[in-house]
Image: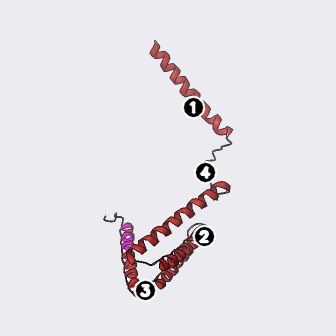
């Protein structure tokens, strides 16, 4: 008899909880029109927090890239400072381009132009020996990226 009583109580609690859900949803002003909600631009504090977080990640990416170039190309302090400035400026330009709206062929072209310009400026800071290494690094990176893109478009996972 106790088992039936416990089962009845559990069923009653489940029904009560189920009945409370629609009430809670309507109390919050939720309406189900069957359509997915439209994407809204971020506003207020959320937008500020997102922008700060994105900027922090961008700064970290620039730092990692300068550290990698310093290690591989043996940059001096003057070169590090100039390259940091170039990459930080490019990162800000890319971020501004991305916040203008959804990605289109034109926006991708603009991002490519920003990156190419930054790479040319970085290359100008380097001495001839460093430029050779930098060019080789870029060629290897492009080949690796092209290989990944080819494998992805062919429907197979890239080999690791």
Residue 127 is labelled as 3
N-term mark: 2 or 3: 2
Q: Which residue lies under the disc numbered 1?
A: 18
Residue 136 placement (x, y as % from top left): 36, 80
Q: Nearer the viewer's eye, disc 4 or disc 2?
A: 2
Asked if marks 2 and 3 touch (Cβ < 8 Å), the reply is: no
The residue lying furthest to the front in this view is: 77
With 20 as the anchor, is 108 left or right in this view?
left
Range of residues picked out in magenta = 142-152
Residue 96 is labelled as 2
Q: How many marks?
A: 4
Residue 84 is labelled as none
Q: Is residue 147 magenta?
A: yes
Q: Spatial distance from mark 2 to mark 1, Cα to Cα?
A: 46 Å
With 110 as the anchor, is 134 left or right in this view?
left
N-term mark: 2 or 1: 1
Q: Nearer the viewer's eye, disc 2 or disc 3?
A: 3
Q: Which residue lies under the disc numbered 4?
A: 35
For disc 2, the neighbor class at 10 Å (few under 14, some 14 to 19, many from 20) is few
Q: Spatial distance from mark 3 to mark 4, Cα to Cα?
A: 59 Å
Q: Nearer the viewer's eye, disc 1 or disc 4?
A: 1
Q: Is residue 151 visible?
A: yes
With 30 as the anchor, is 143 left or right in this view?
left
Which secondary structure lies at badge 4?
loop
Q: Quick one: 98 or 58, which is closer to the camera?
A: 58
157, above or below 71, in the image: above
N-term mark: 3 or 4: 4
Residue pictured at 46% horizontal, 13% vertical: 2
Residue pictured at 38% horizontal, 79% vertical: 139
């Amino acid at each position: 008899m106790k088992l039936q009583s416990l089962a009845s109580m559990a069923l009653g609690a489940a029904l009560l909880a189920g009945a409370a859900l629609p009430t809670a949803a309507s109390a919050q002003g939720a309406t189900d029109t069957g359509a997915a909600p439209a994407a809204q631009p971020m506003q207020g504090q959320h937008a500020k927090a997102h922008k700060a977080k994105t900027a922090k990640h961008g700064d970290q990416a620039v730092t990692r890239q300068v550290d990698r170039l310093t290690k591989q190309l043996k940059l001096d302090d003057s070169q590090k400072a100039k390259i940091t400035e170039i990459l930080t400026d490019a990162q800000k330009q890319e971020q501004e381009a991305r916040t203008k709206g959804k990605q289109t062929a034109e926006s991708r072209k603009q991002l490519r132009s920003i990156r190419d310009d930054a790479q040319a400026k970085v290359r100008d800071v380097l001495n001839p020996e460093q430029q050779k290494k930098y060019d080789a690094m870029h060629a290897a990176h492009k080949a690796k990226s092209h290989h990944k893109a080819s494998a992805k478009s062919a429907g197979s996972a890239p080999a690791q």
